[in-house]
Image (cartoon, rainbow, N blue to C red):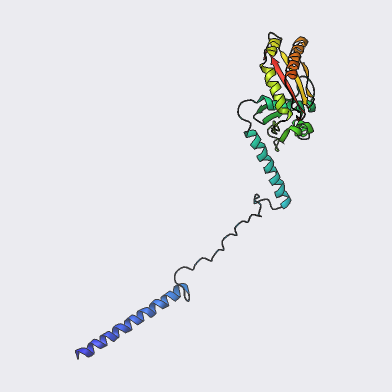
Amino acid sequence: MKSRTFLLALAALALAVVGAVVLILRLTEQAGGPGAVGAPEAPLVPPPTPMTGTQTLTPPEVADPVEARSLEVLIEARNRYLALRDGFTGPASEAPRQRLEPALRALWPGQPAAFTISCRGRVCRVEGPGDPAAWRAQLLGSQPVAKVADRVVVDPDGAEKPAYVLLSEGRPGSGEDVLGDVEKRLRESDETAICLDGAAPGTVEVELLVDQSGITYRAAGTAPLQVVDCVGRAAAALAAAIRVPPATQAATRTVVLEIGR
């Protein structure tokens, strides 16, 4: 009797469990629809396509390829200008200034000089006369400047006035080496110091030329004539004392000596 009662109770318990499961499933279907279990999953978003080496970075708002390329050229010009502008550091360099100055005088002749120039290492800062747009175009198109420069840059936006020139390196054994020696001796010689001692303010400009035949010079400037002639004789003595190697290539340089400044 007890065994039968136990079996009946167990059967009733099983029926209750089955009923509860059925009820839960029905409530779930009513809440989320057939097969729903909680909130629906978000749709899968495909990952972005990685950029390849052939793609060009341009601002996203520039859709036209011609405009995009123009912007790239402008950015490149800005970067070149900033690179030389930021490279204009360190102490003043006399030799690069003397290399570039004759080309600038050929471009803008006259006394006093119509331009300003200063150099730091191989980088020189230049400002020309008159309208900035005009003298920048002249500087960029100058063949004498191009012969001594690796690069000439101006601000493509026109916001900054100076231009910057990166001078090329003097070739080993070239006339630049010879004239550099002449300039150093001329500036340090006792004869030059005697010529300039007590002279009125002004400048003496000694234009030097070297080729396989030797060294020639021409002295001029705003200093009194006797001072210019005196420095010219000192330059002649130095030129005669320096041996020019047979394979020396032609080069020019202008040495500017300032008096009372």
Name the residue nearer the viewer: 164 or 235: 235
Residue 137 appears in the picture as rendered: yes
Residue 225, quarter of the rendered image: top right
Screen quadrant of the C terminus:
top right
- For image coordinates 27% across by 85% down, the residue present is 10
Residue 242, quarter of the rendered image: top right
> Where residue 27 sits: x, y (%)?
41, 75
> Where residue 198 sits: x, y (%)?
69, 8
Instruction: Tell me if residue 243 comes above or below residue 1 in the rendering.
Output: above
Q: Residue furthest top?
A: 198
- For image coordinates 35% across by 79% down, the residue present is 20
- For image coordinates 70% across by 44% down, the residue present is 73
Name the residue nearer the viewer: 200 or 179: 179
> Where residue 168 sits: x, y (%)?
70, 34
- For image coordinates 72% across by 19% down, the residue present is 256
Name the residue nearer the viewer: 38 or 68: 68
Residue 142 appears in the picture as rendered: no
> Where residue 12 sits: x, y (%)?
29, 85
Screen quadrant of the N terminus:
bottom left
128 vs 27, left or right, is right
Instruction: Tell me if residue 129 comes above or below residue 198 in the rendering.
Output: below
Instruction: Tell me if residue 233 comes above or below residue 99 in the rendering.
Output: above
Instruction: Tell me if residue 40 comes above or below residue 140 in the rendering.
Output: below
Name the residue nearer the viewer: 244 or 8: 244
